[in-house]
Amino acid sequence: MGSKREREDNEGEGELLESKRQNVSELESPDSSPPASLLPGFHYGDEDEEERKAPVNGKELVAGLNGAPVEEEEEDDDGEQGLYQGHRSREIEIRRDCPYLDAVNRQVLDFDFEKFCSLSLSNLNVYACLVCGKYYQGRGRKSHAYTHSLEAGHHVFINLRTEKVYCLPDGYEISDPSLDDIRHVLNPRFTEEQVEQIDKNKQWSRALDGSDYLPGMVGLNNIKETDFVNVTIQSLMRVTPLRNFFLIPKNYQHCKSPLVHRFGELTRKIWHARNFKGQVSPHEFLQAVMKASKKRFRIGAQSDPVEFMSWMLNTLHRDLKTKKNTSIIYDCFQGELEVVKESYENTDGETEHRSLVTTTSRMPFLMLGLDLPPPPLFKDVMEKNIIPQVPLFNILKKFDGETVTEVVRPRIERKRFCITRLPRYLILHMQRFTKNNFFVEKNPTLVNFPVKNLELRDYIPLPTPNENERLRSKYDLIGNIVHDGKPGEGSYRVFVQRKSEELWYEMQDLHVSETLPQMVALSEAYMQIYEQQQ
């Protein structure tokens, strides 16, 4: 008798388990695969898409709606099954009239930070509460978002991936056009026509707090000693082809690099004209930088914008390059140098008989380093150090093909440089910082440079163009990064030009102010970006 009852219980449990397996297999339908716009390498789950099972201590576990495993147990049919009937059949009610829409508070919404649940710290299936702005996971009965809706009385949530808005705990989807502005802030989008007109826009935008801002001229939050990242981003935002490429996500939708997608998101947020606030926090981009650079560049540690720019351009090119080794980075910044090396080598193994060996090679470049003359050692009559000045054309002579640059490491060589191909955007950096065994020194020499019409042809020999081509050797300054303060410390700011009105702005983290072109030329330039005149 007892054995018969045990057999019946076992059969009952088997049927219950089999029914749950069928529910799981029904949920794992082909249409639940993530769309192509998702970041590759990230796993996104949805509580009504996946339920995972794992055996623990010999028992079958079924993944709960918030991803947490729930032990198998007999449940009454009326409660659990009735509650999830809508989820499992995937027939979610869509309503236009939601009584809680007036509780949505746009002032507290901030989508600049990482999309992680504030309780479970998971990035799977995260929702933002549109009343308090916090992120919670899932929307099922045992999820954090569901619990928050009951505890706090906040009922409107947006899925940060699908951009669908739901009312909890009722579980229906809200279809209301008044929420479109929130979707645009969560994921700014541009059409190709808007991108073409973006440099002609002279209109200011207004944030929710009443402050005015210029799209493309918004301040970037300094999270902690990240001004070296901010000035680099602000200067790259002036490179028109690079900006236009990243404003349209389909240009890089097949790229698997999180850094590329994060940089694209940041570009769209900076140029978006319907932001809720007049500044952007590059938090997600910095997290991608830390991971991609293996913490070479990180939050809380000051770094060199020249090193960061070099790493950034090379990494973006590596992630975006095609089979022909081309990318938007090389299209904008790559030029070519002819390098003539002269060195003495032993011909017969004896140190007395050394002959001069000359080798010529061509190498691509993304930026050019300029050597500054050493500052004076002694003070003047007024007991003050004289700050020397040098014209840009003097230090550009390094690339005239005749000036010799002596190199000590890795071996003693004499080099001569000559530019054989000019890039569309020329990046120059002044080598202000020199390291010795004890400390870092900063060269305070001021460089006098033109803001418009830098004519390279008058000062350095340039290659002769082809028959049907015209030599474009005139450049205009579009970005100028400046270092203030002591070496190893100090801060960075940048001067950038707004093309629609040809006005100059000084930007330092959140501070953005209009300035005169003459002030740009008086600064201690550290890195500059010049645009070729077409």
Image (spheres, grey):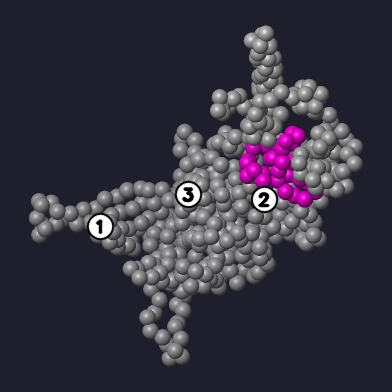
Picture coordinates of residue 297, whole percent (x, y): 49, 54
Residue located 62% across and 53% down the image: 282
Q: Nearer the viewer, residue 129 or 163?
A: 129
The residue carrying pointer 1 sits among few (fewer than 14), some (14 to 19) or many (20 or more) residues within 10 Å by Cα, namely: few
Mark 1, residue position: 411
Q: Nearer the viewer, residue 177 or 126?
A: 126
Residue type beneath disc 1 = Arg
Compared across the picture, whether 466 is left or right of 242 comes to left
Whether residue 464 is visible, yes or no, is no
In the rendered image, which quarter is residue 257 located in?
Answer: top right
Whether residue 152 is visible, yes or no, is yes
Picture coordinates of residue 6, whole percent (x, y): 65, 13
Mark 2, residue position: 112
Picture coordinates of residue 9, whole percent (x, y): 68, 15
Element carrying mark 1: loop
Query: Is residue 60 shown above or below 232?
Result: above
Query: What residue span does the magenta drawing correspond to?
Result: 117-145
